[in-house]
Amino acid sequence: VTRGDSLSQIFERFELPRQDLQAITEIASYKRYLRNLQPGDEFRIKVGDGGRIAELVHDVDPLSTLHLVREGERFQSELITHPVERRQVTTQGVRHSSLFQAGKDAGLSQQAILQLADIFAYEIDFALDLREGDELKVVYEASYRDGEEVLAGPILAAEFSNQGKTYQAVRYAGKEGKARYYSPTGKSLRKAFLRTPVDFSRISSGFSLGRRHPILNTIRANKGVDYAAPRGTAIKAAGDGKIVFKG
């Protein structure tokens, strides 16, 4: 699957029968697995006699595979859940260039690094507060399939040392099953306001009373902090509220 691809485009590119595409997309219970495709996703397709599709296999995620087999003019479908081994993994790292790099050096996946940043989002501004030598320690639950780690998370406990201060978090799931993170003394890490509204953005213009305006080319105060991030980056509300304008 390439950027902007759909199942219809894939069938057209490989000259696969349109009637088979229609039969596959009529499988209502599995439509969502075939519609929400991401670049890098793979389909393994076996073509039988007459150019008709005999079998289609698609890894929905590291833990499950969609398997379609032809039966006449229809397809028999099955979502296979792979057995996995769950282990607790402990790792640590030191920040030299970025949190992402420190997490990668510690063996954390991108998903786990984002989760770590989310856990401490009310305590640390990851755009402004990070310093050379900051340390992270993480205990997380990893899923292994055929001896290979395929899924990292959830994070069970974490520690982040920033500017000489150490922040700790422990995961706890209550009776309703929703997990939250607390300090070792039992205080929730969730505060009234987030420290930063965008994950891993860069500061394009900081607070300054003497900033040169980039468009007007005059000295004009910037009484806020401007962030720059790639198009499509999620923007979070700093706290609970009501959207009155977007644009």
Image (cartoon, rainbow, N blue to C red):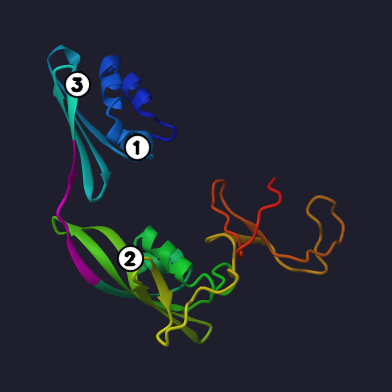
Q: Foreground: 188 or 163?
A: 188
Could you say which disc has been placed on residue 74 in the image?
3
The amino acid beneath tag 1 is: Arg
| Residue 83 falls inside the magenta stretch | yes
Q: Earlier in the sequence, mark 2 or mark 1?
A: 1
Q: Main secondary structure of the magenta part?
A: strand
Q: Earlier in the sequence, mark 2 or mark 3?
A: 3
Q: Foreground: 101 or 112?
A: 112
Q: Quadrant of the C terminus?
A: top right
Q: CA distance from mark 3 to mark 1?
A: 18 Å
Find the residue positioned furthest to the top: 50
x and y, in percent, of residue 71 in the image: 13, 22
Q: Earlier in the sequence, mark 3 or mark 1?
A: 1
Query: What residue span does the magenta drawing correspond to?
Result: 78-88
Q: Badge 1: how crowded within 10 Å, few (<14), some, or many (20+)?
A: few
- Residue on which disc 2 sits: 154
| SS under mark 3 | strand
Q: CA distance from mark 2 to mark 3?
A: 39 Å
x and y, in percent, of residue 232 in the image: 54, 46
x and y, in percent, of residue 104 in the image: 37, 64
The amino acid beneath tag 2 is: Pro
- Residue on which disc 1 sits: 32
Tell me whether circle 2 and circle 3 mark residues in contact (CB < 8 Å): no
| Residue 15 falls inside the magenta stretch | no
| SS under mark 2 | strand
The amino acid beneath tag 3 is: Arg
Residue depicted at x 28% and y 35%? 29
* 226 with respect to 40 (left or right): right
Say if 104 sits above or below 4 in the image.
Answer: below
Q: CA distance from mark 2 to mark 1?
A: 24 Å
Tell me whether circle 2 and circle 1 mark residues in contact (CB < 8 Å): no
Corner quadrant of residue 54: top left
